[in-house]
Image: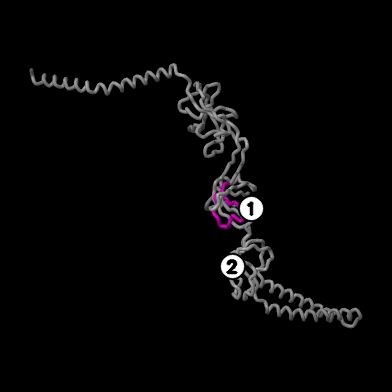
Amino acid sequence: MSKLTKRIIMLSVFLLVAGALAYPKVMPLFSSSSGSSTGSQQMNRGGGATTVEAVIADFETIEDRIFTSGSVAANEEVELSAEASGIITDIYFEEGREVSQGDLLLKINDSQLQAQKARTQFRLNLAEQREVRQARLLERGGISQDDYDATLNEVNVLRAEKQLIDAQIEQTEVRAPFNGIVGLKFVSVGSYISPNTRIASLQDIDPVKIDFSIPERFISRVNIGDAINFTVQGYDSTFTGSVYAIEPRIDPETRTLRIRALSGNPDRLLFPGAFANITLILEEINDALMLPSISVIPELNSQKVFLVRDGKVEESRIRTGIRTSEKIQVIEGVAHGDTVLTTGLLQVRPGMDVEIIDIKKTTDI
């Protein structure tokens, strides 16, 4: 026996032994594949309808919203200051307390003006008495018209001087220009102040203003009277308000439109300067047909859903509107009461028989 023949015999024996050892592990794979293929063929030939879940399209009330941020501002706000310079003689307000329009808040020394007023008043009294006497003499022809006119002119000049002094005395008083709450004071009795001296702030915070901006693409959809909801840090509750003013120009740098709303603040919970997370409600739709987002199948230039009628699948192209976190509004392609598939969307085809094992109304989702 040649060496070549021996090598062939040894290789054949090795292959037979290896095949015998691998056979138990390899055969189940072929059996499983064959069985799966056979079972799949049997299912496709004689299996029952595909089981799916569906929803019944129903009307809902939805809101078209814009989410943005802004800040709280006082309805009215002013930094109190005096018109005149001088020494403060009295402070009549308390920090953090409410005041009414016209209340006297601070007084500057006006003793010199008061003395000038008294002197002018004495001169005015004498001039008025002389004018009365000369008026009687004029009636009898005792004096000329020129003499009487000179006395009357003196009376009018003194009256004007007195009015001027009264106006100067008013400038030594600081009064509340509107109802509000006085902030922290920065002066004390005895301080010398001028018109540039900061005294305190006065703010009207009921109601408060809410300032915010929206992208310019929404300019045609926002209107006076639109409602807003907003939250601020420190409170779990949601506050409400309404738009009352819209800036008549778009900011060229940010391409946004500035809007201002009013919100009642009777409990003084909102403070000017607070950061606000705002929801602007552009439109409220009472009869929106809503579907779960998972039931809508996106395509290249359209969207579709699968309907079920008489146990068979139908395909319908749709046009959508407002989206929420879980649902989408359908404007065309689905009618109220239609049954729309939510599962099995990749397996079903138009005309296929399906069995619905779970069905709900969209309002229950």
* Relative vertical location of residue 89 with respect to residue 296 in this rendering, above or below: below
How many marks do you count on the picture? 2
- Amino acid type at image mark 1: Gly
Q: Which mark is residue 351?
A: none
Q: Tag 1, which secondary structure? A: loop
Query: Along the horizontal axis of the image, is 132 left or right of 157?
Result: right
Query: Along the horizontal axis of the image, is 162 left or right of 189?
Result: right
Residue 146 in sight in this render:
no
On-image quarter of the N terminus: top left
Mark 1 is surrounded, within 10 Å at the Cα level, by few (under 14), some (14 to 19) or many (20 or more) other residues, namely some
Mark 2 is surrounded, within 10 Å at the Cα level, by few (under 14), some (14 to 19) or many (20 or more) other residues, namely some
**261 and 188: which is toward the camera:** 188
Q: Which residue is mark 2?
A: 185
Residue in the picture at 61% in, 52% down: 260
Where is residue 224 shown, x and y percent of the image? 64, 48
Q: Which residue is mark 1?
A: 264
**103 and 119: which is toward the camera:** 103
Which residues lie in the magenta part? 256-279
Where is residue 331 shown, x and y percent of the image? 58, 33
- The answer to whether residue 261 is magenta is yes
* Relative vertical location of residue 202 with respect to residue 133 in this rendering, above or below: above
- Amino acid type at image mark 2: Lys
* Relative vertical location of residue 100 with respect to residue 86 in this rendering, above or below: above
Residue in the picture at 56% in, 35% down: 329
Q: Quadrant location of residue 46?
A: top left
Q: Tag 2, which secondary structure? A: loop
| Disc with the residue nearer the chain's start (2 vs 1) | 2
